[in-house]
Amino acid sequence: MKSYITILAVALFVSCFCLPGFAACPSMDFTGDCRVDFEDFAVFAGQWLDEGIPDPEGMVWVDINDPGIGGGRVGFNGEMSKYETTNAQYCQFLNAAYASGDITVSDNNVIGANGTNAGEDFVGELYYDSDGAGKTSNGATNGGAARIHYSGGVFTVDPNFENHPVTWVNWYGATAFCNYYGWRLPTEWEWQAVADYHGNYIYGCGTTINPGGPFESGIIANYNSSIHPDGTTAVGAFGLYGYGMCDMAGNVFEWTSSCYNDCSSGIRAIRGGSWDWGSIDCRVSGEGQWGHWNHYAVDGSHNIGFRACRGDAPIQAVVPNVVDMPLAEAEAAIATAGLVVGTLTEEYSSTVPAGNIISQYPYPGGEFLPGSAVNLVVSKGDVTGMVWVFIDEPNFTGYMSKYETTNAQYCQFLNAAKSSGDITIDGNNVLGANGSNEGTDFIGELYYNLADPGVTVNQFIHAGASRIHYNGSSFIVDSGFENHPVTQVTWYGATAFCNYYGYRLPTEWEWQGVADYDGTYNFGCGIVINTGIANYWDSAPQDGTTSVGAFGTYGYGMCDMAGNAYELTSSPSGGDKIMRGGCFVSVAGNCSVTGGSVSGPGIANGSRGFRACR
């Protein structure tokens, strides 16, 4: 029995180094004589055996039943600490955890270990940085510095900082503290449910943050306008609000158990603002708004602490990441997570294929009540109907259009550019103008010839003719030619199309790098060319051009890089521009990956078109 009492005496002596001084007599004085002696040890031993590990000194719990903020967000039903966890309380935990083998100390860093306490440990993870530096700014000197230090087997708190909130504790250290005593961190939405009181608080201290409160400055929270010499202030210094809570606006940000977006990122949500951040950052508001912040779980800081809660954690569903998934797969993933698909909207996207998910709300990793809705934005594909192929080869890395630009796509551009003032019509000529679109214009230059009859010779009838016309109010495409490659477009017109949508023409070498695939292709359709796999002179379609993609897919998944229409590039040749790929009136040799021709930038005819890249 003597050895057991000796152990208890040592434990009590150690714990007294970090008592916060909430009472006039020593906190371990159980007999009421304002002394800690052997009579108290017996009482303490009995409590420990009957009740388990005692709470850290000064923990004050508030019983709260809040319904939440709606929209699938949970409320809070349980007990939450009235105050942010103090240096004294965290010091007491460190001494207890050190004695039970649940932490180790290395170079003033507190590291998790697997000790005798039943609470979950994070073995090998940093919990607390005793050397954590403060911030000297905004009237504070060394504000928020680490105030707990280790020497000779004992953790102690710097004098006068016992009741300041602990800082330089990371998410693992905050969670380990809670686990040690059978508590937990609140989720971010539980935290918000308590902070916004009955749903009408903007800040954790009410509808305003400096309305002329208990201090001469009128400030009722510790944020960057409060200006305190130590940065942090003693917990509770700014009064009680809402459910009787303190410092839910400012002093220090508070760790929550919630992941920020994807849990695999190692980022956790923090809430409440801090002594060195602005009032707007102290709002209780949530996702996508001011007041919703995050921090890497492994990193402590001069302005992050925590408060604990106890009671059952809410049953929540974690929102899966469905961005870029096809809609059917996204719906299945959402259902598997216990959620439902809410509103579906569609938008054009130049980066997300048609039918795939562009974005979602709530964001991935968010925690909701089961059955809550996830709203999705589904891609309608590129605004121009482009189909993009991602290519990574020595001469080109990026996206290139699978097909040559069609009459329908160029007609869409002309109608848009007419509305934005980026083109004018002069008889049968479409000319560049300086409109409201941000893309570079070629003012006064010919873009498109509206009235070329094409060529009628041998097997061709009006081959390569203008297929886009202007009816006095809008541009329209001849029926049946919507998916043929646009011809009668100049280099200026092709480049203006690309500029309008944020694309560009490929250089001749980028074009060749894609066309010759792995270096073994002689033509854009493979090693050989014939009338079954490319549209050139011997193919002899009556209209000259054929629908893009009619001759199949080759190489990187590209179509018509041999024949159909010459393709303009951005590369110059003297005052001309280089074209590649051959066309419907080319002989086979001119369709090779090394063959080509040139054109003046303002010349339009029925054999040349283009494809875009980005």
Image (spheres, grey):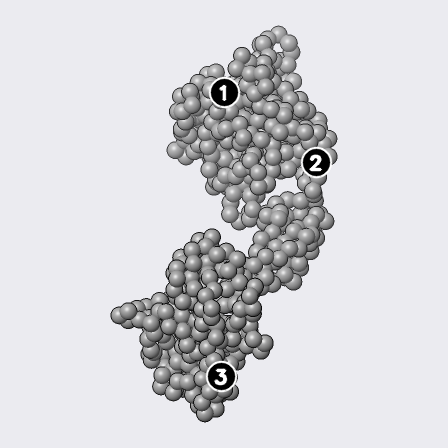
Q: Residue at 70% x, 43% y: name it.
A: 72
Q: Residues within 10 Å of mark 3 (few under 14, many from 20)?
A: some
**Location of mark 2 (residue):** 68
Q: Quadrant of the C terminus?
A: bottom left
Q: Residues within 10 Å of mark 2 (few under 14, many from 20)?
A: many
Mark nearer the N terminus (2 vs 3): 2
Position in image of residue 207 (x %, y %): 63, 25
Mark 3 and mark 2 in contact (Cβ < 8 Å)?
Answer: no
Mark nearer the N terminus (3 vs 1): 1
Q: How far is mark 2 from mark 3, CA to CA?
A: 70 Å
Say which mark, if any, is on residue 462: 3
Mark 1 and mark 2 in contact (Cβ < 8 Å)?
Answer: no
Position in image of residue 312 (x %, y %): 69, 37
Q: Residues within 10 Å of mark 1 (few under 14, many from 20)?
A: many
Q: Amino acid at mark 2?
A: Gly
Q: Nearer the viewer, residue 177 or 171?
A: 171
Q: Secondary structure at mark 2?
A: loop
Q: Residue at 53% x, 65% y: name it.
A: 412
Q: Residue at 40% x, 70% y: name it.
A: 490
| Image: 335 above or below 302 | below
Q: How far is mark 3 from mark 1, CA to CA?
A: 80 Å
